[in-house]
Image (tube, rainbow, N blue to C red):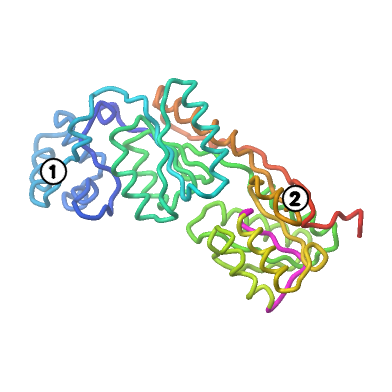
Amino acid sequence: MDIGEDERAGGEEVGIAGAVGRPTIYDVAREAGVAASTVSRALSHPGRVSFKTAEHIRKVADEIGYQATKIERDLPQQRSSLLAMVVADITNPVFFGIIRGAERTAAHAGYTMLVLETQESEEHERQALERVQPAVDGIILTSSRLSDSAIRDLAKRKPLVVLNRTVGQVPSVTSDNVKAIKRATEHLVESGVNAITYLAGPDASWADGMRWRGLREASMELNLKVRRIGPCLPTMRGGAAAVEEWLRTPTPGVIAYNDLIAIGFIRAVMSAGRRVPEDVSVIGFDNILDAELVEPRLTTIAAPLVSLGSAAVNYLLRNTRTQSEGAVEPVLLPARLVVRDSTVSHRSR
């Protein structure tokens, strides 16, 4: 995400609308009837907007009690060599590889990577971004819960890359979810599965939407019955909670939003007396370390996690240096199916 040259020089912008406890730059923009980027220019470099507009914005800011944060007032007018990566859940193993790839690439380029956790909360994500945005040279959003419009607005003021999601006019890096899910579906059909239940992830997840889309497209191509359970918490507890509903109308195949949901489902469904893969074949997504440790070992889609993190940093640094404008092409990395014991090979049918 790019910002104007004047804004990169060290403005007083605060960041994301909706922060709790004090007015934000978005509140000023709404009250003044102008864009947030105009407020940023008026407060940081008033010579770049008309005198009348700058005075109007400053008056509105005073009236609603808007103040720049201390970190903004103290921030030196030069690059900080800091990057921020925002993750939804630091305990989710899927982020380990992404963070490692990003941190190594950032360090090689002379940058330090800050990791911020949002606990799967849009509100926490907004607050974290508001605090850190003025102090860093760029931001990587992984599995963001913010709306497309909020992300685009942030991109106008700070170089930014979105990971595991695509947003129009914003640089993004993702794995090929649709193609990967179609391959997983083909694998299940080859082993004799004629109906699949999808254990969905969070409602606000772009990746969840793409995986469900891929499954539906595959179902039409392969004349397959599919249904959806969820949204589920993207945790083992979320997978276990889905078992009760699955048992009411069981299907011979299950594809989960991620490995944690798949593992939780396997444990709970086996406790309920069903066998994996004899009664139900299960496929996860992400290929976390636990996928090989669970019994039976989990068949899963392996996203190139380390490469995703590294590619995101490279893309971000390219934008911070060139500040290129115009068409933004997403980076799409391949994913592969790793067949293990939670599905039956078609050769054994």
Residue 15, x across and y down, in percent? 28, 43
User: Left of 2 or right of it: where is 296?
Assistant: right
Numbered disc in front, either 1 or 2: 2
- Image x and y of residue 165, in percent: 52, 46
What type is the residue that disc 2 sits on? Arg
Q: Where is residue 263 in the image (x, y as percent from the top left)?
A: 66, 58
- Pointer 1 residue: 57
Instruction: Pick the residue in front: 294 or 126.
Output: 294
- Which span is picked out in magenta? 248-259
What residue is drawn where x is 54% and y is 34%? 100
| Residue placed most toward the observer, 89 or 136 | 89
What amino acid is at disc 1? Ile
Q: Is residue 295 magenta?
A: no
Identify the residue at the far right of this view: 348
How many residues crowd around disc 2 within 10 Å: few (fewer than 14), some, or many (20 or more)? Answer: some
Q: Name the residue under label 2.
A: 183
Question: Magenta segment: does it hold 252?
Answer: yes
